[in-house]
Amino acid sequence: MVVWILTGFLSFLFLLEGTVLQYVAPQAWGSPLVWIPQLVTSGVIILSLYRGRKSGMIFGFCFGLIHDVIYAQALGVYAFSTAAIGYVAGLISRQFFSGPLVALMTTGVCQAVHLLMSYGWFRLFNMTEMPWKMALFYHIIPSVLINMVVAYPIYRGVRWILKRSHPHSVQLFD
Amino acid sequence: MFMRLFANRRLFVTLLAVILLVVSIGLTRERGGLTWAEAGLKNAGAWLSGWLATPSQAVADWFGGDVVAGDGSESDRILQLKAEVARLKQENDNLKEVAGYDKEDKRSYITAKTVARSPDRWNDRVVIDRGKDDGVKKGMPVITEEGLIGRVSAATDHMADVQLMTDSGSTPGIAAQVQAKGKNVFGLIEGYDAKKKRLLLKKVPDGAELKKGQLVVTSGLSDLFPGDLLIGTVDEVTRGEFGVDRMVYVKPAARFEQLHYVMVVRDPAKIHVEEHRKELNKRKGGGD
């Protein structure tokens, strides 16, 4: 049951990425800085912190694949990257003392790795010809910062969903 | 024997995943059609996004993100677009009558709403809510009322993907010509300079007299694109990468920041050419 609620929540975030946020993001108003909204990735990272790396990997793979089918020109880049990030986030959560600060830092680091990884694959397969400096300073760094801020409501959302279904099991990241 | 290979399972799985990724990208990029599963998912995505797109576009308009001057309300813009289409059709008819063209080969425009845009800007694509059922085909040019914005990169029955000219990937060039004094100068639109916000017109012959402000339009000689769609104006001329040609920075006429309504250009003449070529390929048995 809780899996379906989470799926619905992440699907909603996925739809927001391509529609509403495309009119909010700075690039829609002529700014050279680009925010790549990655709400689903934030969701997968936070979910992985709570539910473990395997769950994170499966959710990451499914939503990455949906992203690939709908927006990308070749299948696989996001399916791989998001799944890997889900797994890594789960690993990190086991290594450190858990808390909201760790959750925030994990989200930031994983977002950065995810963006770098997807850019790297795109560049490798010549699906983009953007120079790396431009990609890093105008696309990746602003995106990571804004995504970290936006991750907070997602964190609350995921926590609320998990708490509602398992009232006693979630005490990790309070 | 084999158990030792599986002993380090994590490494094994990672390697396998990377190999699968490479194979998957190799197989799925640059292919002709879509499988039914992908088409279904794309249709569902476009349909759901459509619900969110309309209110967010209205709000963006209200905040002044409107592309066209006017009071900015949605119905006003639709009227404006309709007027524009009617005017263009009228003009087109008149010109064709003068040139003695066939009535059959009349261009038509399919107006579509954009429902979503790819979140990352490495792949700059928009999803529109018209598909094969409405006559959209892969490869057709897409314009706004200001100028050319891109081409259809994939189409299902109910939606289509538009690859914008600002896409940073390697795209097949668009044949273009600069309307210089007395004669037309040909070149290929290949790529986009995101920092300068200029399209790159490459392989322009040396010696052509190009001046800032001259119009750049699509070339009618192309097999795919109808001619005389406005792309932009000449901004700056530099030496090309081969040393014997020139590269022109073209200031795009259309704005790419917020795309609400777009038009797919349907040119029967080019469709006939395409069908004819397919027929020839089939007869030869060589093509796919």
Image (cartoon, rainbow, N blue to C red):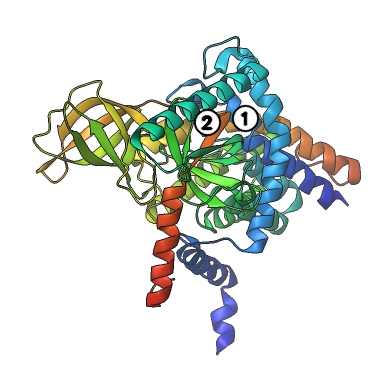
Q: Residue at x 67, y 21 (%)?
A: B58
Q: Where is mark 1, residue-wise? A: A21
The x, y position of residue A131, in whole percent, is: 33, 41
Q: Is residue B206 left or right of residue B288?
A: left
Q: Chain of mark 1?
A: A
Under mark 1, the amino acid is Leu
| Closest to the observer, B188 or B270 | B270
On-image quarter of the N terminus of chain B: bottom right
Element at badge 2? loop
Q: Residue A90: in sight, yes or no? A: no
The nearer-to-camera label among 1 and 2 is: 1
Are the residues flagged by discs 1 and 2 from a single subunit? Answer: yes
The x, y position of residue B83, in whole percent, is: 56, 21
Mark 1 and mark 2 residues within 8 Å of each other at the beta carbon: yes
Residue B50, image quadrant: top right
Q: Residues within 10 Å of mark 2 (few under 14, many from 20)?
A: many
The numbered dot on residue A106 is none
Residue B219, image quadrant: top left
Q: Residue B276: in sight, yes or no? A: yes
Q: How many marks?
A: 2
Under mark 2, the amino acid is Trp
Q: Residue at x 63, y 58 (%)?
A: B38
Q: Chain of mark 2?
A: A
Q: Residue at x 64, y 38 (%)?
A: A39
Q: Is residue B167 above or below residue B75?
A: below
Q: Where is mark 2, residue-wise? A: A35
Q: Residue at x 26, y 30 (%)?
A: B249
Q: Is residue B127 left or right of residue B49?
A: left
Q: Is residue B179 above or below residue B288?
A: above
Mark before the other along the chain sequence, 1 or 2: 1
The x, y position of residue A56, in whole percent, is: 69, 53
Q: Is residue B158 above or below residue B60?
A: below
